[in-house]
Amino acid sequence: MKSVESSNRPAQQAHHNDEHYKKATMQWVDDIVIHHNFCPFASFVRTPNQIHSCVIAGNTGDVLEALFEELKRLDNADDIATTLIILSHTSFADFNEYLDVLAIAEAMLHDWGFSERYQLASFHPKYVFDGNSIDDPENYTNRSPYPLLHIIRESDITRYMKNEDDAQKIYTHNISKAKELGCPYFEEALLSLTKARINEDPIE
C-alpha cells in the first residue's frame, strides 16, 4: 500500500512547479516590464498587487476553460486589475502552437461576449513580431520566461492611454530601449529566471 506521503508527492511537486512559474513571471514583470517602462501603467497595478496569476498545465481545451473562468473572475472581482495565465504545457513552448491557441482564445473572447470589456495581450519566450527576424531586439518587449495570455481590462487601457499618440509613444520607447539594451541582456535575464527552477530545492 502506498503511504499518504508518497501519494501526495505529485500534488506537492505540481504546487512547487506552479509557484516557480508564478514567481519567475512576476520577477519578469518587475525586472523587465516595469523597470524598463515597457508598460507605463504596469506599476500602478503591481503596487498594491492587483495582478492575479494562474498556471495551466493542460492542453488547448484546458487553457480555454481557464480563460473563461478568469474572465468571469475579473467580472466579479474589483480588487483584480489584470490576469496572467501561464501556459506550462510543453507543447506551447513552440511559438506556432502558442499562436494557434492565442487565435482561438481571441475568437472565444468575442463569442463569449467579453470582447468589449477585455482584450488579450500575448507574451512568449520565442516571440517574433510579424516582419521581424528572430534575432531583432524589439522582439524582447514581448518575450517572457514562459508563454502567457494577459487579460487586460479595456477600461484600464482607456484610463491610461488617452489618445493614439500615447500608444505610439509607448511603441517608440520600447523599440528604442530594446535596441539600447540588446539581445544578450534579455537572453541572460530570461535565462536566469527559468534556470531558477532547476536550482530550487526538490520536494523531499
Image (cartoon, rainbow, N blue to C red):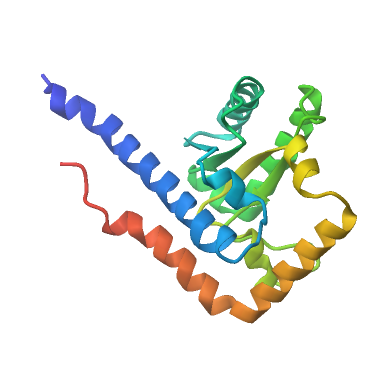
Tell me: residue 85, above or below residue 184.
above
- Which quarter of the image is occupied by the N terminus? top left
Instruction: Count how many numbered circles sit on residues in the image.
Output: 0
Query: What residue is at 76 percent from the left and 62 percent from the top?
Result: 170
Q: Considering depth in this image, is 22 or 7 the residue closer to the camera?
A: 22
In the picture, measured across the screen, residue 14 lies left or right of residue 185, that is: left
Residue 135: tell me if it is visible. Answer: no
Q: Which residue lies furthest to the right in this view?
A: 164
Tell me: residue 81, above or below residue 129.
above
Q: Considering depth in this image, is 63 or 187 the residue closer to the camera?
A: 187
- Which quadrant holds residue 130? bottom right
Tell me: residue 107, above or below residue 129.
above
In the picture, measured across the screen, residue 191 lies left or right of residue 131, that is: left
Name the spot of residue 129 as percent of width and height, x first: 74, 62
Residue 137: tell me if it is visible. Answer: yes
Q: Considering depth in this image, is 9 or 183 the residue closer to the camera?
A: 183
- Which quarter of the image is occupied by the C terminus? top left
Query: What residue is at 47 percent from the left and 36 percent from the top?
Result: 57
Query: What residue is at 62 percent from the left and 42 percent from the top?
Result: 149
Name the spot of residue 7 as percent of width and height, x first: 20, 25
Q: Considering depth in this image, is 178 or 194 the residue closer to the camera?
A: 178
Query: What residue is at 63 percent from the left and 52 percent from the top?
Result: 123
- Which quadrant holds residue 175? bottom right
Name the spot of residue 94 as percent of width and height, x first: 58, 53
In the picture, measured across the screen, residue 128 lies left or right of residue 171, that is: left
Name the spot of residue 166 as percent of width and height, x first: 82, 57
